[in-house]
Image (tube, rainbow, N blue to C red):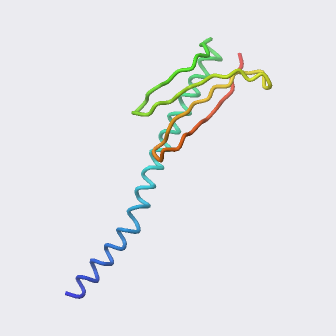
């Protein structure tokens, strides 16, 4: 009986230590997926502007239940247009990545 209680308590301690780390790892994997999608959308927007003559209007794109907001700003110091994409990740952090494009 004592061995069974000892074994279950060790198993419980291992689960209490490992499970939170596993959840954090899974959320960070999802965040990496969201980052990859965001950078791909930003790259597509910049490529459309530079090569296809696309406009510089701000817009919101929903992809896999995540809203990506694309905003354009004209940067006179650099002499190019700046596109920034924003979204909220799995840990409720606001992420913003920017890129420059010039025709």
Say if 78 sits above or below 35 in the image. Answer: above
**Which quarter of the figure is the C terminus placed in?**
top right
Number of marks present in the image shown: 0
Image position, residue 14 (x, y; %): 37, 72
Q: Residue at x 23, y 88 (%)?
A: 2
Q: Quadrant of residue 8?
A: bottom left
Vertical placement of 63 versus 35: above or below? above
Q: Quadrant of the N terminus?
A: bottom left
- Residue 64 is situated, as x and y percent measured from the top left of the image, at 40, 33
What residue appears at the point 64 percent right and 32 percent down from the top-left corner?
98
| Lateral position of residue 74 relative to residue 45, left or right | right
Residue found farthest to the right: 77
Q: Is residue 16 above or below residue 44?
A: below
Residue found at x 48% / y 44%: 92
* Residue 18 shown left or right of residue 3 in the figure: right
Residue 35 in percent (x, y) is at 53, 39
For this view, does 54 lie left or right of residue 8?
right
Q: Residue furthest left?
A: 1
Say left or right for 47 vs 68. right
Quadrant assignment, res 71: top right
Q: Position of residue 4 (x, y in %)?
A: 23, 82
Q: Nearer the viewer, residue 41 or 83?
A: 83
């Amino acid at each position: 009986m004592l061995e069974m209680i000892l074994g279950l308590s060790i198993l419980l301690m291992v689960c209490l230590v490992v499970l939170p780390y596993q959840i954090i790892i899974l959320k960070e994997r999802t965040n990496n997926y969201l980052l990859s999608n965001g950078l791909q959308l930003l790259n597509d927007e910049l490529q459309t502007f530079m090569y296809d003559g696309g406009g510089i209007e701000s817009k919101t794109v929903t992809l896999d239940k995540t809203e990506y907001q694309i905003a354009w700003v004209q940067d006179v110091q650099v002499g190019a247009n700046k596109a920034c994409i924003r979204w909220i990740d799995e840990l409720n952090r606001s992420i913003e990545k920017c890129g420059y494009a010039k025709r």
